[in-house]
Image (tube, rainbow, N blue to C red):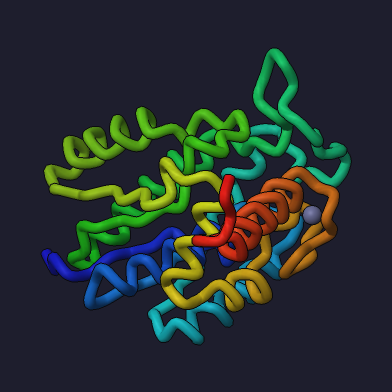
């Protein structure tokens, strides 16, 4: 196993782009893997490819579009309007059931072929949108399962797990890529890169976090309360 190599599950969004540059700081060799899962906005893969080129990392795309067709959700089905907030009694309809389970499992098999045992994913429990597969307990459990399944010592890294969105922006800034993340990533559920449409749940979270971070930065050392 190449102990200094990592495979980043990379969508070209704010979180995974921050993780890509985090990985570049911590590992000698970094590769990025994107998935096509039937998402409405497949141009996110082209943006991801462009970012990976800038980051000078190897980039691959895998077509796993069967995942999107297994369960009904608004990210792949144009006939469903997106939930703007989490319903009280269920997950939002932007939830793609099994997505992180499949992504990480496929990534682990692929990493094994490449002699890589470090996997990096941008999931976060803090801004938990009601997605059960973004929780730390799920990641830890899957890590054990992957090791048992393949008799390997995979390490799943989740650098954003306990950060809120403003702290994720701060990490991007500390890594020297705040402008790149702000202008070139796609997080918006309506497929608009950069600051996005401004009104979907993903834009709300992203833009509120950015505002909060920039306020904090502006204030640093000067604010009395
Ligand atoms: Zn949006």
Q: Quadrant of residue 91?
A: top right
Q: Going by the image, does 150 lie left or right of 196?
A: left
Task: Name the residue rendered at 46%, 77% in the picture.
Answer: 176
Task: Name the residue rendered at 74%, 68% in the picture.
Answer: 193
Q: Going by the image, does 71 lie left or right of 23?
A: right
Q: Residue furthest front?
A: 224
Q: Nearer the viewer, residue 150 or 16?
A: 16
Q: Position of residue 164 (x, y in %)?
A: 53, 45
Q: Position of residue 168 (x, y in %)?
A: 51, 55
Task: Name the residue rendered at 50%, 37% in the picture.
Answer: 126
Q: Splitting the image into four quadrants, where does ligand 1 fall?
A: bottom right
Q: Nearer the viewer, residue 63 or 116?
A: 116
Quarter of the image with the N terminus is: bottom left
Tally the numbered discs. 0
Classify 17 as above or below 85. Answer: below
Q: Nearer the viewer, residue 107 or 158?
A: 158
Q: Residue furthest top?
A: 89
Task: Name the residue rendered at 61%, 65% in the picture.
Answer: 218
Residue 70 visible here: no
């Amino acid at each position: 196993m190449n102990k200094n190599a990592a495979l980043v599950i990379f969508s070209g969004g704010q979180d995974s782009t921050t993780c890509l540059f985090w990985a570049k700081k911590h590992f000698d060799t970094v590769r990025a893997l994107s998935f096509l899962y039937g998402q409405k906005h497949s141009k996110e893969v082209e943006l991801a490819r462009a970012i990976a080129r800038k980051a000078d990392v190897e980039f691959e795309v895998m077509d796993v579009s069967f995942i999107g067709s297994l369960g009904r959700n608004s990210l792949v089905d144009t006939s469903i309007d997106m939930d703007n907030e989490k319903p009280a009694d269920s997950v939002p309809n932007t939830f793609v059931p099994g997505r992180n389970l499949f992504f990480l499992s496929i990534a682990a098999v692929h990493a094994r072929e490449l002699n890589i045992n470090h996997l990096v994913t941008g999931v976060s429990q803090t801004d938990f949108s009601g997605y059960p597969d973004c929780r730390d307990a799920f990641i830890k459990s899957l890590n054990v399962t992957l090791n048992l399944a393949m008799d390997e010592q995979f390490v799943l890294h989740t650098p954003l797990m306990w950060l809120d969105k403003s702290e994720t922006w701060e990490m991007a800034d500390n890594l020297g890529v705040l402008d790149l993340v702000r202008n070139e990533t796609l997080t918006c559920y309506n497929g608009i890169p950069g600051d996005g449409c401004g009104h979907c749940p993903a834009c709300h979270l992203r833009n509120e976090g950015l505002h909060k971070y920039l306020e904090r930065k502006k204030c640093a050392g000067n604010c009395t309360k």
